[in-house]
Image (spheres, rainbow, N blue to C red):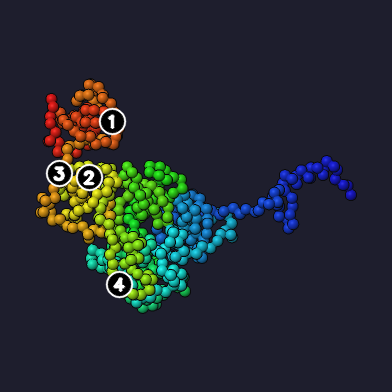
Amino acid sequence: MKLPSRKSLLLILLLSLVLGVAAPGGMIMAAGADQQVQFVTPIMIVNSSFLNIRTGPGVQYNTLITVVGGTELPVLGRANDNVWYQISTVVGVGWVNAEFVIPRGDFTNVPVVDTSIAALVAQAGPSLVGLPDGQGGGGAVASSQGGGSNLTGLVDENGDPIAISGPNERFRALINVEAVDLRSQPADGSPALATLFREFTKDYPIVGSSRDRNNIDWLAIIVPNVGTGWIEAPKVFMRLSGAFRTVMVIDADSLGMGDGPGTGSNRLPIVTRGQEAFLVNISQDGKFIQIELGGGEVGWIPFDSAKQRTGTPTDGLNLTSASFAAAVPGDLGQGGGTAVGSFGLSTPHIIVNTAFLNIRSGPGAQFIPVATVSGGTELRVLGIASDRVWFFVEGTFGRGWLNQEFTIFRGVIANVPEIPLDSVAATIGTVAAPTAIISGPTVLYLAPGTNFGPVGTIPGPAELAIVARTADGTWVQVNSTLGFGWLLTSQVVLQGDISLIPIVS
């Protein structure tokens, strides 16, 4: 037998170092002994023109984002039915239906994800609703006899009691079908306690969750004047609770959250019209607000891209954990009568939700402005006109009226006295001096004409007192940090009674 030459042995050794050495069983090992085999993440390729990525494994869940055909989505997990798959998107984790995608890769090692309602909500946010001890597990059964147990002593505008699940309530259940039976046990055949109908103004605190033998998820909710009962989880929409925090609703089609006021971010989700978020903070210039999504993500958006949610049972309650604990003593949901107590509600006030807002001398646009305030300004609410549109407010300027459409209300509206429209004469505010508002850099001229030369440029935004005007109204003289000068009225917003301004030739 011919033995390999020295040159052949060197060549074999070199190839072994480059390609790796054969391991027992025929597996080729990498050159580094400490390296391990890495499995390639399988992907789903969208096989339709557009596809909704949802927040949970089913069409009953909200749309997280809509992607176009051909989009590649890394797979993170799968549901027990092998129909819905958990995937990663640019805005976070979502779910897709396997019917509308093309699988690529090895799915053998894709883990099964717990798709119970409690697990899904836990994935979406820091906590479900601060469930009482013994009511947060999959097999918890809530008593149907505690009709008054968790009531707070508060009532809504219709006089109906408002129930709160606990001092950290975050989510509430909104009926998402025409009607659903409230049952005594988490099972379809159990006795019905009442029938609940879909109403935007009705939602219910969640105090437990369970899954029946048919793998249907159930939620235990408190229904005032009825008690605690069970409804199928797919028949509800998870709404943010406004009991302890102000809830904002996104008023823009699509908007990226920023890490700070006016900044962008490549790590925060994109919010869409109708999405809810908690109000966290307002920037010093009043142009941006910091919000917290239901999943816990915190970021900044423009002030005018969201509005305060109104019309739900918890909106405007403005409670605190301490005041709730004082009003509802003992173990939450474990019996006892209706707890009634003082909540120490703060004085009702509004936050201006636009760049600038006129405070008028009466409840209507026909009244002259007495002042102009910037976005983010907080004003104490003294009353509301009987048309429920105009607030009577107090600020550093004195007192005046503003349209509630451009504000965020904080507090309990029931605590605001109503002022009949035929009695507003006693509330007329003091007329402020006419002013010129500029929104950006504006040239100040020596005299009313561009041929006279500029005094300088006034940086905006700014509000300047008007001291004179031309007869044709095309120029106004103002007192600024650069001294007296003239501005083109076409470049400013005039506020106040212009007839009070003297005319110069």
Marks 2 and 1 sit apart, C-alpha to C-alpha, by: 25 Å
Relative image position of residue 53 (x, y in whole percent): 44, 55
- Label 4 vs label 3: CA separation? 47 Å
Q: Earlier in the sequence, mark 3 or mark 2?
A: 2
Q: Residue at x 31, y 44 (%)?
A: 286
| Of callouts 3 and 1, the N-terminal one | 3
Residue contact at pointers 3 and 2, CB within 8 angstroms: no
Q: Identify the amino acid type marked 1.
A: Ile
Q: Residue at x 17, y 38 (%)?
A: 433
Evaluate whether residue 237 shows in this view: no
Residue tagged 3: 430
CA separation in Å, label 3 and label 1: 28 Å
**Which label is found at residue 338?**
4
**Amino acid identity at mark 2:** Thr
Q: Are marks 2 and 4 in contact (CB under 8 Å)?
A: no
In-front residue for pair 13/300: 300
For the C terminus, the quadrant is top left
Q: Residue furthest right?
A: 1
Q: Give the Cα separation between the discs numbered 4 and 1.
A: 61 Å
Q: Amino acid at mark 4?
A: Thr
The answer to whether residue 266 is visible is yes
**Which residue in the protein does label 2 denote?**
396
Residue depicted at x 59% and y 57%: 106
Q: Which residue is mark 1?
A: 458
